[in-house]
Amino acid sequence: MRQLRHPLTWLLLATALAYLNALVAGFQFDDFNIIVDNARVHSLAAWWQSMPVIRPLLKLSYTLNWISGTGASGFHVVNLLLHLINVALLWHLSRFFPLPATWDADRRGTHARVLLTLLFALHPIQTESVTYISGRSMLLMTSFGLAALLCWLQAGQRARPMAWRALALVLFAAAILSKEVAVVLPLALLLLRGREPTPGWQLPLLALFVTATVLLLFALFGYQRLLSMPLPRGLFANLASEAHALYYLLGQLLRPHALNIDPDLPELTAWSVPLVLELSGIAGAILLAWQQRRHRCWLSFGIGWLVLMLLPTHTLIPRLDLASERHLYLSAMGLYWLAGVALVWLP
């Protein structure tokens, strides 16, 4: 790794080769309910008449795929292209990831970025998002979201910085209209370092944008019906069950031979010693990230990114499926960064 030339080129090539066999796969599981048997995504007119609808940009991408007449292979091609776009976006965005204080960005920093991007591109946990057509929501959200972060962070270097920040907000909105959990993505800017000092108005603007977006989701795009649906479990049971599910997902990062698109995880409804230990571990990690935010900002960033990206799906929202491996597609990026830094530190 001493002389890395055009690392993004071979990263993209390796990723394309790894997922090439997915292009001949067919529709699976929810693909039939969401796409094949869903007339609302079979024409642009039907898609428009279905408005307002949850995740309208995702549904539009399905519609465009369907009317192209390329069958399941066309859907898989788009999924793979989105993953390749995300690999490229992450490579460029990682220039803003915090490094250990004694490191130089050109040598050690580049090595850590290569390892980060390689893990994101090729870790088996990404399989559900890339090869499962219904996992496209995560891919599309990530494409818009990473592009938005990059636009915002580079705005200070552009001739018209406010125009670039406005473009970033449009891209954030597109990410949220692809998968609503992207509402936390603007807050990731607080974890990243820009080329210029952070403006004092940035935090209030981001908070206002997130609040307004949540209100618009409920007012215009049909999310208000979620408030009237019976909850699958209570608040405590959901927090306890999701905490346990989080440990399961983190374990999947170390078990590439045991990937499972539909794990049967238990619902926890009472206190227990294992649950206390699991909650203590999560609280300890968050406390460590806060304590090290100045001295080891790379450590705080890795933990903070993971926690922030999993916040919508593993806290208050009671989902039917406690865990899905595609939820680590974007969130595990923080852990990949920690792994990259740690590996570069080795002799």
Image: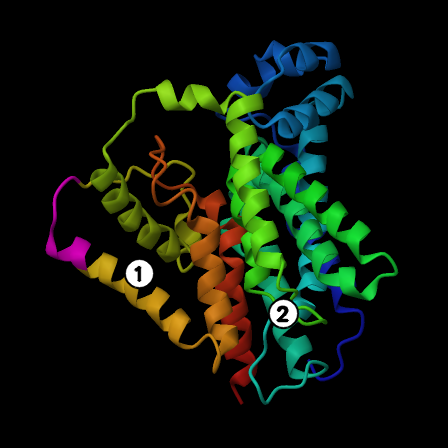
**Which residue corresponds to the image point at 51% horizontal and 75% vertical from the top-left?**
297
Marks 1, 2: nearer the viewer: 2
Q: Position of residue 220 (x, y in %)?
A: 58, 22
SS at circle 2: loop
Front residue of 9/319: it is 319
In this rendering, is residue 36 above or below 109?
Answer: above
In this rendering, is residue 206 above or below 336?
Answer: above
Front residue of 53/328: it is 53
Tell whether 312 sits left or right of 273.
right
Residue type beneath disc 1: Ile
Q: Residues within 10 Å of mark 1 (few under 14, many from 20)?
A: some
Residue 193 marker:
2
Q: Earlier in the sequence, mark 1 or mark 2?
A: 2
Tell whether 224 sits left or right of 149.
left
- The magenta span reads 269-276
Residue 20 in sight from this viewpoint: no
Front residue of 51/30: it is 51
**Is 275 one of the magenta-colored residues?**
yes
SS at circle 1: helix
**Pointer 1 residue:** 282
Tell whether 252 sits left or right of 273.
right
Front residue of 137/6: it is 137
**Which residue corresponds to the image point at 33% horizontal and 34% vertical from the top-left?**
318
Residue type beneath disc 2: Arg
Q: Position of residue 112 (x, y in %)?
A: 61, 74
Residue 165 in sight from this viewpoint: yes
Quadrant of the rendering where the N terminus is positioned: bottom right
**Is 262 one of the magenta-colored residues?**
no
Q: Residues within 10 Å of mark 2 (few under 14, many from 20)?
A: some
